[in-house]
């Protein structure tokens, strides 16, 4: 894929409003992006399935996975003063929430700007100045003065989704993106780029790129896609948290401009070790930079797909600084290397090599 086209796609994907359970805007973008290269269907959970146009009956199947949802919020209730009580969707920490600019999709489908309200310092006690309130005590302000105004005029009520409102930027000088929701918009964009790279090619495996929903609230969509696709092997394209700004060099395993991260462990997942080693050797052969990581936290769709089908699975992670916050950094260089590695695996993999991943 052309670099400028990839940058434009990534920016569109990152700017999309798509939190868990409300992924439709990104799903439509993804479908429009890959329709020239794949036949796309969408199920009732908003999982999208992009079957490479050259797929042929009888071939083994390689599933690509990325997820469409990002962390966000949902309206729980409207307070008497018109402020919105909300509940997080996905893994937020309370320190990253106050003063975020947001947009609420109201009951008419319109987007209403708002902010996670904070008390001005003039009115704070010393204790309040040194503490972040619990999420249950936070509110979103849309400029309303009463519960009735919020419900009747703004058309905001229980169940309305809430999205972070930040526009993605790209810095040509250092090749770095800045914006929101990089988890997992970079993975979704990488899947689209891989499909474009393979356009018109006959591969040893049928390729199905599944864009799964509701990853941030329990890998829910990936269980469904795995049962539908029934892959023989799987590549998960996941945006992964970088540790290079707070971890010693000797321990840092995921950093900007070091290439994709191949995950050896997280709290939900251990990859097929033979597939993992094959991917590392293929990356070395093709001069593709990468790191490997053992994580004591986190989780991703690979767990659901691996456990559901038993298909050898690895995770190709695109490093993102400050994941699950309103503001993230990620490098085009790492995106490109991830696309190159996934493309190389699909072109190189054979039934014999796949069989070797299960040999004792």
Image (cartoon, rainbow, N blue to C red):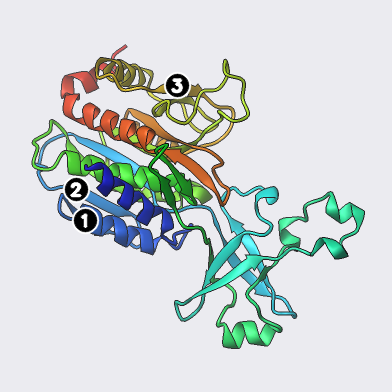
Q: In which quarter of the image is the N terminus?
A: top left
x then y, percent, for residue 195 = 21, 43
Question: Residue 162 occupies which quadrant of the picture?
Answer: bottom right
> How would you rate the neighbour count of disc 1 (Cα within 10 Å): few for under 14, some for 14-19, many for 20 or more?
many
Left or right: where 242 falls relative to 23: right
The residue lying furthest to the front in this view is: 173
Choose between 303 and 84: the one closer to the eye.
84
Label of residue 259 in the image: none
Residue 223 visible in the displayed image:
no
Task: From the image, tell me which residue sits under label 1.
Answer: 40
Q: What element carries label 2?
A: strand
Please report whichever mark, 2 or 3, sits nearer to the chain's N-terminal start: 2
Left or right: where 228 falls relative to 199: right
Label of residue 292 in the image: 3
Task: Please tell me which residue is depicted at 34% across the width and 42% down the height of the picture.
Answer: 65
| Structural distance between the alpha carbons of marks 2 and 1 | 6 Å
> How would you rate the neighbour count of disc 3 (Cα within 10 Å): few for under 14, some for 14-19, many for 20 or more?
some
Task: Please tell me which residue is depicted at 48% across the width and 50% down the height of the picture.
Answer: 179
Marks 2/1 in contact by CB < 8 Å: the verdict is yes
x then y, percent, for residue 201 = 9, 37
């Amino acid at each position: 894929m052309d670099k400028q086209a990839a940058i434009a796609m990534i920016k569109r994907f990152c700017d999309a409003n798509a939190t868990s359970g409300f992924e439709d805007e990104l799903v439509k973008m993804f479908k429009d992006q890959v329709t020239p290269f794949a036949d796309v269907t969408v199920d009732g959970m908003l999982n999208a399935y992009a079957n490479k146009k050259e797929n042929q009956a009888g071939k083994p199947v390689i599933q690509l996975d990325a997820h469409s949802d990002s962390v966000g919020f949902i309206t729980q209730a409207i307070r008497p003063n018109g402020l919105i009580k909300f509940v997080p969707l996905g893994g937020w920490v309370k320190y990253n929430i106050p003063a975020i600019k947001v947009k609420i999709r109201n009951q008419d489908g319109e987007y209403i700007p708002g902010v996670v309200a904070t008390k001005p310092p003039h009115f704070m006690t010393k204790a309040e100045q040194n503490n972040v309130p619990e999420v249950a005590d936070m509110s979103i302000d849309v400029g309303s003065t009463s519960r009735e105004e919020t419900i009747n005029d703004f058309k905001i009520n229980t169940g309305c989704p809430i999205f972070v409102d930040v526009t993605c930027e790209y810095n040509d000088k250092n090749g770095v993106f800045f914006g929101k929701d990089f988890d997992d918009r970079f993975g979704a964009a990488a899947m689209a780029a891989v499909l474009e790279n393979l356009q018109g090619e006959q591969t040893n495996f049928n390729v199905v790129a599944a864009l799964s929903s509701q990853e941030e609230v329990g890998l829910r969509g990936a269980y469904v896609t795995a049962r539908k696709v029934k892959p023989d092997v799987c590549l998960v394209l996941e945006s992964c948290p970088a540790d290079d700004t707070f971890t010693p060099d000797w321990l840092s395993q995921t950093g900007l401009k070091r290439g994709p991260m191949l995950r050896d462990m997280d709290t939900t997942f251990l990859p097929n070790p033979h597939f993992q080693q094959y991917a590392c050797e293929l990356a070395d052969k093709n001069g593709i930079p990468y790191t490997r990581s053992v994580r004591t936290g986190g989780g991703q769709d690979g767990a659901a797909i691996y456990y559901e089908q038993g298909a050898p699975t690895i995770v190709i992670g695109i490093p993102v600084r400050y994941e699950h916050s309103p503001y993230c950094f990620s490098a085009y260089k790492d995106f490109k290397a991830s696309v190159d590695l996934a493309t190389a695996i699909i072109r190189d993999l054979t039934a014999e090599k796949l069989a070797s991943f299960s040999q004792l």
